[in-house]
Image (cartoon, grey):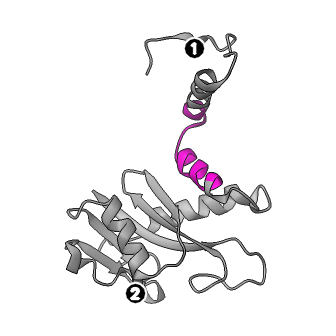
Amino acid sequence: MNVTLDPIGSGGGPGHKRGRGTSRQPVFGIFERNGRVYTEIIPHTGKTVLREIITGKMDPQSVIYSDGWRGYDGLVDVGYDKHYRINKKYEGFKSGKGVHINGIESFWSFVKRRLGKFNGVKSHFDLHLKECEWRWKKPQEQMNKELCKLLVKYGKQGFPHFNYLNDKSEN
């Protein structure tokens, strides 16, 4: 599995410091190169927090791409031998060797645009973040079908006017 790692600070607004070290709520993201993404709200972006998530969510055989954040130091020591870093200061978001973190950066951009529609999120940020995970790279038709199935499954009355939902041949 090829994955990209990146923590961000979320929240705040104009005039707030950007990047790590802000007063914003830190969020950690794991992006699989096949398009799936996992996010988690974290207390800080230190090595212990990041390592706990990485070792709990990722196979040691994974190929990891990340920036040079010191929170990733020592991953090789705990069995993640294929860890490639880029230095954003000198290389931007990709190196000349095919190493890049564009996927997770694209996801963070999507999250910021999505949540910006609500002028930020004051409560239930974790749920909004999980919704962004779910929406990521899904066609509208697929999202509609999944939402309708959930409404039928958990709704009290169901929705008989959605004929395609009654088709038992689909999973």
Q: Report the Cα–Cα distance between label 1 and label 2.
A: 51 Å
Give the extent of the magenta segment: 127-143
* Percent of width and height locating residue 114: 68, 55
Query: Who's the residue at 58% across and 23% down the image?
Result: 153
Q: Residue type at mark 2?
A: Arg
Answer yes or no: is residue 94 visible.
no
Magenta span has 81? no
Query: Who's the residue at 45% across and 55% down the image?
Result: 37
Query: Who's the residue at 57% across and 14% down the image?
Result: 164
Image label count: 2
- Which of the pair 139/60 is nearer the observer? 60
SS type, badge 1 = helix
Give the number of the disc on residue 70: 2
Pointers 1 and 2 in contact (C-beta within 8 Å): no
**Quarter in which the N terminus is drawn:** bottom left
Q: Is residue 111 left or right of residue 7?
A: right
